[in-house]
Amino acid sequence: MKRGKRYTEAAKLVDRSNLYDAAEAIAILKKTASAKFDETIEVHLRTGCDGRHADQQIRGAVVLPHGTGKTVRILVFAKGPKAEEAKAAGADFVGAEELIPRIQNEGWLDFDVVVATPDMMGVVGRLGRVLGPKGLMPNPKAGTVTMDVTKAINDIKAGKIEYRLDKTNIIHVPVGKASFTEEQLADNFQTLMDAIRKAKPSTVKGAYLKSVTMTSTMGPGVKLNVGKLLN
């Protein structure tokens, strides 16, 4: 795979044989994120979980203290007073059954997070084939199936991120933007790691975290010292 000149130059700053502390990794990533746009800083955690077993699934959400740096568009499925509450709380889109054909048939997906009141999950369930593969299905564990739509919207706008295992048992999550200070990125990363630690399934055999890599959108990955992260 041929890499661009910018990537090649950035890769020189990373010692592939070294495992870095989080603070060192963040400092390197801020230097290597040289694209013309504000790159996202992401964390990729390769776990020892087997997501095929329900008792080894990891799914949850955490509010990053400094947010993600991204403007999030929220769709809320609600009716009556709860729909009015969602609009008042700042939801970008609010609706019920009438949104089904728009999403199913017209391919409308101009939103980043879906929140639903429990009574609307029968309706939302009909969109499972569309929303599921995109990771957009509301879920009680992530706090996106709730009667408290105001809190859900406020948390998401404040920087709430969802984490879950993918099919290869890796968790991919953003922890901010390259324009954030090192301290802001470190705070966000620490908050994420605290949540991941607490989410460890008791049935996992062997190493819980096999590797942790931080990367920017266009830059090389920086591997972290997992032993230090779990202490």
Image: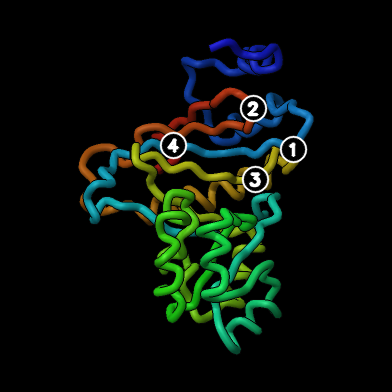
In the displayed structure image, the side of residue 209 where residue 214 appears, left or right: right
Q: CA distance from mark 2 to mark 3?
A: 14 Å
Identify whether 149 is placed above or below 158.
Answer: below
Give the quarter of the image for residue 75.
bottom right
Q: CA distance from mark 3 to mark 4?
A: 22 Å
Q: Secondary structure at mark 4?
A: helix
| Residues at marks 3 and 1 touching, judged by CB atoms closer than 8 Å | no
Provide the residue designation for mark 2: 218
Measured as percent of width and height from the top left, residue 109 is found at: 59, 55
Q: Secondary structure at mark 1?
A: loop
Measured as percent of width and height from the top left, residue 70 is found at: 69, 51
Q: Residue furthest right?
A: 36
Of badges 3 and 1, nearer the viewer stands: 1
Q: Secondary structure at mark 2?
A: loop
The numbered disc on residue 176 is 3
The numbered disc on residue 228 is 4
The residue under label 2 is which amino acid type?
A: Met
Provide the residue designation for mark 1: 38
The numbered disc on residue 23 is none
Give the quarter of the image for residue 174.
top right
Q: CA distance from mark 2 to mark 4?
A: 26 Å
